[in-house]
Amino acid sequence: MEKQKLPNSNAVLTLGILSILTCCCWGFIGLILGIIALVLAKKDLKIYNQEPEIYGGYSNLNTGKILAIIGVVLSSIYLLFNIYLYAFVGEQGIKAFQQNLMDKMKYQQEQQE
């Protein structure tokens, strides 16, 4: 008998990959995608543990779950970093830092020419 695929194994894998790829979008998108992937993985893991002999696709589920955990951690760190930046440095401080960085890059380009 051919094994059935777990219902959400490919979705968990896709969401886990996307959570890592989008972790630098202010931290929100990667965090949301990672949490959704973890919830779907938990549901599928319950299904798999009830009858592991009839289901396939566990490797996709496990890989997606690991990627989702990494995505949630990276997104959380980036989100906390952004909150810290705005709370302690402020918007004007960030703009001043960016302007200083642009001036340095412009100066280096002029020196190379």
Image: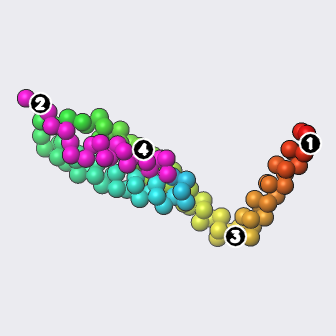
Q: At numbered mark 4, what does the secondary structure look like: helix, strand or loop? A: helix
The magenta span reads 1-22
**The magenta stretch spans residue 29:** no
> Does label 4 or label 3 sit earlier along the sequence?
4
Q: Which mark is residue 111?
A: 1
Which residue appears at 91% of the width and 39% of the height?
113
Q: Amino acid at mark 1?
A: Gln
Res 52 visible:
no
- Kindly identify which residue carries mark 3: 91
Q: Could you tell me residue 89's position as x and y percent?
A: 71, 67
Q: Is label 2 or label 1 in front? A: 1
Residue 37 point in image, percent of width and height: 34, 51
Q: Is residue 96 positioned above or below 101 on the image?
A: below
Which residue is at a point 35% across and 38% down the rendered structure image?
Answer: 63
- Between marks 3 and 1, how big is the CA–CA gap? 30 Å
Classify residue 5 by image quadrant: top left
User: Are the residues tagged 4 and 3 within 8 Å (C-beta)?
Assistant: no
Residue 50 appears at what percent x and percent y?
13, 44
Q: Earlier in the sequence, mark 4 or mark 2?
A: 2
